Structure formats: C-alpha cells, structure tokens
Amino acid sequence: MFSCVNDEGQGGISVVEGKVYKVLHPNDNFTFEADTFPAAKEDVYIVYGDEPIYGDKMETGYDGFYRFKFLTKGTYKVFAYSTLTDARKVAVIDTVTVAYGETKQVQNIYIHEGKSLETSYIKGKVLVKYYDKGFITGLIPAYDLRVFIRVKDAPYQFDEIRTGLDGAFIFQGLSPGEYEVFVISEQAGNKVLTPVIKSVTIDSKGIIVTIPDSFEIIINA
C-alpha cells in the first residue's frame, strides 16, 4: 500500500546481500571474536526507501548469508533483531544504495543475545591507510588494532579492546553516560601520534550504540 511513495522495491534486477552474525553474551567474560558466530536461520528484513514498514523478509542460511533479489535501484535499509534479556527486540540496521543491475554487499550485521545484555554496548569499526615511501594505500579494515574508551573529558582510558578481522570492535558492560572512544593515528611519513576521537552517548540500559562513521587512521609501514 506504500509502493507509490518510493521508486525502491521489487521488479528490477538489482541485488542486496550480506551476512548476519550472532554475538552471544552468556556472562561478563564476553570476547568479541570467541563469542561471535554466523547467525543461521535468523530473519532479516528489508525496507524499501523511506517506507514505514518493511517490504520483505527472509531467513539466513547456515553461514548467516542472505540475498534480496529482483530489486529496483535505490536506497534500502536492511536489519535483524538483537534480543535483550527481557525479550525486547532491538533492530540492528544498515543502509545501502544500489544501482541498476548492481549486486551490493551490506556491511556485516551483528545481532546480540544473552543474559549479560542488561548493560549497554558501544560498537564501531576502524579503517586504516598504510603509508610507505610516498605511497599510501586505500582504506582497509584495521585488524588487531587497539581501541580505547574513556569517560567524556577524563584524561585517560578505563578500558581498551582490539579490532577483529573486519576492523570491528565492541565495548561491553557500560552504564548510561557520555563517553569518548578513540584510536591512535600516525602522520604520513613520521611517527607523530594523534588520537582520533568520537563522542558517544548512552541514553539508557540494555542498548547497543553504533558509531555511525568508521574511524580512519594512518600507519607508517
């Protein structure tokens, strides 16, 4: 009934696809890599343009993979649900724009469940450029890079974590408040260190806050 609002929807030859991963939080000893698995047989939803309801859904395969086919060009939202300890559902959403006839990969979607989810989480991603003798690479995921968190305006971090294979990180066990998440970048051609800082606010318990823009840093090879 909303199809007249947008050009997005079915009837084309474009494809939106990606993978969903489930992060388990059985206790406070959560480790992002060890507790992350492909989310098999999970519902994934797609929203056509700015429509107020989802347009279609499908179930992931054994490896967490999904594919929405026969789409027209345009902008889509894809989401899956995390499950909090009181059975509330929280949508984890990504937005993707696809051209006519294009197959577009959505960033990995990480959903969460487990009894320790009453605390809140901050997650994000770090991308890096490598500089070597005047040549600089394009941005790629930063693996095994240290990411720090501190209370806003505090002089030092109270925790740190390392990024995973796709540059992703997640801080757990956080209370509502204002935080600063930061990584250290070098300057191209020298070892001068500069923090790259993003401010994050957690408004309530039991939520997952995603930093919308990836960190971008430089490392000298």
Image (cartoon, rainbow, N blue to C red):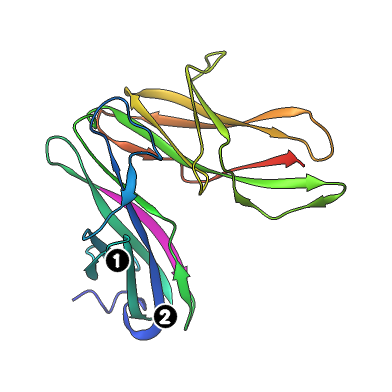
Residue at 36% across, 76% down: 8
Location of residue 120 with respect to 188 vertically, above or below: above
Q: Position of residue 19 (x, y in %)?
A: 37, 60
Residue at 28% across, 35% down: 207
Between the C-alphas of marks 1 and 2, the distance is 15 Å
What number is the disc on residue 47? 1
Amino acid type at circle 2 is: Ser
Residue at 29% across, 66% down: 46
Q: Secondary structure at mark 2?
A: strand
**Left or right placement of residue 199 versus residue 135 in this view:** left
Nearest the viewer among 16 and 24 is: 24
Q: Which residue is mark 2?
A: 14
Location of residue 194 with respect to 106 vertically, above or below: above
Q: Which residues are magenta?
A: 91-98
Q: Secondary structure at mark 1?
A: strand
Q: Position of residue 64 (x, y in %)?
A: 31, 60
Label located before the other in sequence (1 or 2): 2
Nearest the viewer among 158 and 24 is: 24
